[in-house]
Amino acid sequence: MKTEALFYEKIKDKVHCFLCPHNCVIKDGHFGKCNVRIHEDGKLFTINYGEVTSISLDPIEKKPLYYFRPSTQILSVGSFGCNFTCDFCQNYSISQSVAQSTFVPKEDLVETVMTTKNNIGIAFTYNEPSIWYEYVYDSAKLLKEADKNASTVLVTNGYISEEPLKELFPYIDAMNIDLKSFSTRYYKDLCGGSLNPVLKTIEMAAKACHVEITTLLVTGENDSLEEVEEIARFLNTVNPDIPLHLSRYFPRYKLQSAPTDISFMRKAEETAGRYLHKVILGNI
């Protein structure tokens, strides 16, 4: 559903969106980089409010969150669109296009969360939840008002501006944040973004809620022990108890390199373990 967006300002005949660090300045009739926020006649609208492409009851470990309410299940929901263009995206069919969706009012979503058996709350995942911001904010707030013990989770690339992130924190219990690399080149060339805003999100989130980090180790791109060490050292300065999920890459979307070498994954686990107390290997 098309709804007026938050976090924008009018600049002459354009609008400036400051939801995320792209800071898109958008002409009338055009979308921002996320392909879901459009400028129409001096106003910015989001086209994915309440639009659900995927919903499933998942183990919390699948998010992946291993140290937040383990051995429970959480209702996971996603929309379409993303503010990154990762060459290796696993969910490119919904992240990189306007996918088929069903409109679900926030009241209906919260009702589903509360009436689903063996469910601890809601995880906004599958596509990038930060560019689903208005619906995520409204739904998370409504759920907390209905049941303060229900858990709300974000599975995110962390590419969001500080002001909207701060406004969301009171309604978020846990985040899994992708730290895709420790290289500005990698973020620019493979993801269409930048590194420093993600590091800032991690630092802020670690003070606000439970945080776990995922790094996909992509063959020939970021599969070096030096880079794994840089990531682990950074997380150590934030909090050495932050869990780091080192995930094995498989060919996907535009990238067809070989799957990550298993022996390298083991060495990466050992390297990160010198700085962090909790290192988990995924996809192996």
Image (spheres, helix red, strand yellow):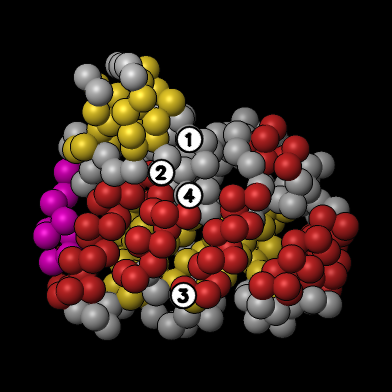
Q: Residues within 10 Å of mark 4 (few under 14, many from 20)?
A: many
Q: Position of residue 225 (x, y in %)?
A: 87, 59
Q: Position of residue 93 (x, y in %)?
A: 43, 35
| Disc 3/disc 1 C-alpha distance (Å) | 26 Å
Mark with earlier residue (4, 2)? 2
> Is residue 207 depicted above or below 124 in this figure?
below
Q: Which residue is mark 2?
A: 19
Q: Position of residue 82 (x, y in %)?
A: 45, 39
The residue range painted magenta reads: 98-111
Mark with earlier residue (1, 4)? 1
Image disc number at residue 160: 4
Q: What residue lies at 53% left-to-right and 66% top-to-bottom?
A: 204
Q: What residue lies at 69% left-to-right and 32% top-to-bottom?
A: 189
Mark toward the viewer: 3 or 2: 2
Q: Which residue is mark 1?
A: 23
Q: Which residue is mark 3?
A: 209
Asked if residue 119 can be seen in this view, the reply is no
For label 4, the SS is loop
Asked if residue 63 can be seen in this view, the reply is yes
| Disc 3/disc 4 C-alpha distance (Å) | 16 Å
